[in-house]
Image (cartoon, rainbow, N blue to C red):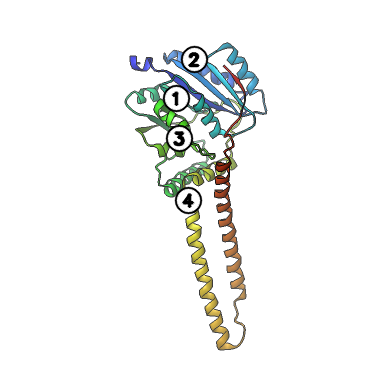
Amino acid sequence: MNKKINNLKISIVAPVYNEGENINFFYESLIKYLIKNKIKYSKIILVIDPSEDNTFNLASKLAKKDRKLKIILFSKRFGHQQSLLCGLNQVENSDVTIMLDSDLQHPLNLIKKMVETYCKGFDIVNTKRVFSSDVSIFNKITSFIFYKIFNKLTGLSMETYGADFRLISEKVRMNIVSNFSEQNFFLRGIISWVGFKQTSISYTALERKNGVSKFNLFSRLRFAYNGILSFSFLPIKFFIYFGFTMSLISFLLTIFHVFEYLNNAVLPPGWTTIIVLLTFYFGVSFIFLGILAKYISLIYLQVIKRPRYIIDEELN
């Protein structure tokens, strides 16, 4: 490893939730890897969403032995993205920040390669997941569809199968924490939006040592939904155009049935068709109103300026 890399100041940010079975092994593996590869770190920052197990107690014991290990406990569960934001806000005296999950599925041996890539002149080193054979076809397809839809609706170029396992320079970190105040914080979209010189490294996710993934289907859907609404107004435009189209069809059907009535002097058949169309139209209208209400709620949250997270306890 060259001298330039050895002189870098590195901070590591890891969100933690219900990882009592893994937290000790994660910390020990990370420290062992950094020492073995002679990578100097300023801080390791663990941001803990209040967990149902003993995650915080175990992390607190580790913090007593290592002053470079900073532990942050939220007052309530604020989620993965806000945990990353909080960690980025806590970084000090670093040249680069590396973000990774604490469940050990992000391979630690990629850290050295990320730092080496940064030293070649990149401000952001993203990672791209390569799915192993044990990942279901459903997960692969839904992930692919999400990235394609997100990029199409937003006009961004977010890496397909990208992850929140990345390295960013101090310049990028300062821009993110200083300039982005949205309540619905979606870091992957922001990273894609900010520009700078970026590249990506492929990796295969490791198996969890203990426990199960907290990122279920519902979490994925909510993640995708919030991400798209954070960066695109096209859903509203689509339903406006669709609404106009349905209104035009309804108007033409009305003219047709009036014409039939005047010619035959009887009520025309096809009321079932009309009822179906009206039902469909009102269903679409309520979907549109729901999406519109979501945008309004995001505006409301932005206007009232509630804190994006609250820290309960802080160690080191």
Q: Earlier in the sequence, mark 2 or mark 3?
A: 2
Question: In screen coordinates, is 242 left or right of 278?
Answer: left
Mark 4 Cα shell of 10 Å, populated few (<14), some (14-19), many (≥20): some
Residue 38, percent from left and from top: 42, 13
Q: Which mark is residue 97?
A: 1
Amino acid bearing label 2: Lys
Q: Earlier in the sequence, mark 1 or mark 2?
A: 2
Q: CA distance from mark 4 to mark 1?
A: 32 Å
Q: Which residue is mark 3?
A: 179
The residue at the point 36 percent across, 22 percent down is 116
Q: CA distance from mark 1 to mark 2?
A: 18 Å
Q: Which residue is mark 4?
A: 233
Amino acid bearing label 1: Thr
Q: Is residue 257 above or below residue 279?
A: below
Residue 283, percent from left and from top: 60, 61
Q: Residue furthest top?
A: 65
Q: CA distance from mark 3 to mark 4?
A: 21 Å
- Can residue 161 be seen by looking at this rendering? no
Q: Earlier in the sequence, mark 4 or mark 1?
A: 1
Q: Nearer the viewer, mark 1 or mark 2?
A: 1
Q: Secondary structure at mark 3?
A: helix
- As rendered, which of 51 and 20 lies closer to the eye? 51
Q: Quadrant of the image for the C terminus?
A: top right
Mark 1 Cα shell of 10 Å, populated few (<14), some (14-19), many (≥20): many
Q: Secondary structure at mark 4?
A: loop
The residue at the point 36 percent across, 25 percent down is 118
Q: Quadrant of the image for the N terminus?
A: top left
- Can residue 82 be seen by looking at this rendering? yes
Q: Which residue is mark 2?
A: 32
Amino acid bearing label 3: Asn
